[in-house]
Image (cartoon, rainbow, N blue to C red):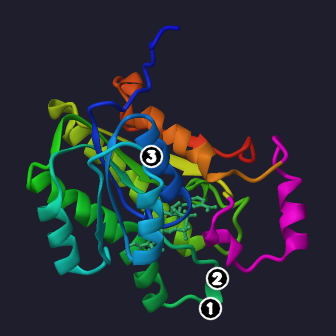
Amino acid sequence: MSNYNPFTLEGKTILVTGASSGIGQTTAIECSKMGAKLVITGRNAERLQETFNQLEGEGHRQIIAELTDGEDVNRLVSECSELNGLVLCAGKGKTLPLSFCSKEKFDDVFSVNFNAPVELLRLLLKAKKITKCGSVVFVASIAGMQGRTSPANAMYGASKAALVATMRYFAREYSTKLIRFNSVNPSMVNTPLIQHGAITEEQRKIDMANYPLGRYGEPLDIAHGIIYLLSDASSWVTGHSLVIDGGVTI
Ligand SMILES: NC(=O)c1ccc[n+]([C@@H]2O[C@H](COP(=O)([O-])OP(=O)(O)OC[C@H]3O[C@@H](n4cnc5c(N)ncnc54)[C@H](OP(=O)(O)O)[C@@H]3O)[C@@H](O)[C@H]2O)c1
């Protein structure tokens, strides 16, 4: 049997934020199965260890960090080796009608979903930790593209739209170094982020009926898109948002 695999991550070192849960956890595990060495980060030590235990192969590292804390972020950057790939997955959900929003709540969502990933990226680039031909993947959301399928999600959607806008600028800015910047934009994915959300089981069933492919996503659906963007199979793809949404935005 041939070993041909254009999506391999052999020889790549990849940092995944939000690796202690949901999409980030599955992405880290899948990347290791594709041959990558992982640096995984999250806040919850126990769950990060669970991810670490499921990584295949040798040479992985785990680093606990609160990504809104400057000292933690500096430590994470200094402890990172050279990276061929970066998955900025850590984030938080927030569903609130406008009348319940406030500047503090906006700041809270933006500090985790926008400021933290952009600052980590900035410091990694400044420290020259991302190699030539590296690949950066932002985990955004369809909530940043439209409001039809995600009502009362304005703050969250705005934070993800901001992420995608910066991603496009960085794609141009770093094109001379052949560093690529892309995003994945998922719709609803079964993770703790939505399981602890405000919708009831009945509302979930009604919502799921809007999905042409008949179901919410699983973390694996998103991880596979991320692997494509990290791999050399996508080496001519930059500044792109890959919508992975079961067809709900068609
Ligand atoms: N699930 C969905 O339907 C969906 C849809 C579209 C986009 N997304 C995006 O996908 C990404 C992952 O979400 P998920 O569904 O996998 O959620 P999740 O299971 O709740 O995981 C969130 C991850 O982010 C980490 N995190 C949150 N705040 C952090 C902070 N201040 N510093 C460091 N780490 C922090 C968490 O770390 P600890 O657990 O260790 O605290 C956890 O690892 C998010 O950016 C989310 O917006 C999710």
Q: Residue furthest top?
A: 1
Q: Which residue is mark 1?
A: 100
Q: Position of residue 51 (x, y in %)?
A: 46, 61
Residue 67 vs residue 78: left or right? right
Q: Which residues are magenta?
A: 190-214
Residues at circles 2 and 1 in contact by the CB criterion of under 8 Å: yes
Whether the magenta-drawn stretch holds residue 122 is answered as: no
Q: Which mark is residue 183?
A: 3
Residues at circles 2 and 3 in contact by the CB criterion of under 8 Å: no
Callout 1 amino acid: Phe
Q: Residue at x 26, y 46 (%)?
A: 170
| Foreground pick, 76 / 135 | 76
Mark before the other along the chain sequence, 2 or 3: 2
Q: Secondary structure at mark 2?
A: loop
| Foreground pick, 39 / 247 | 39
Query: For residue 120, which quarter of the picture?
Result: bottom left
* Alpha carbon distance from label 2 to label 3: 25 Å
Q: Residue at x 66, y 57 (%)?
A: 189
Q: Which residue is mark 2?
A: 96
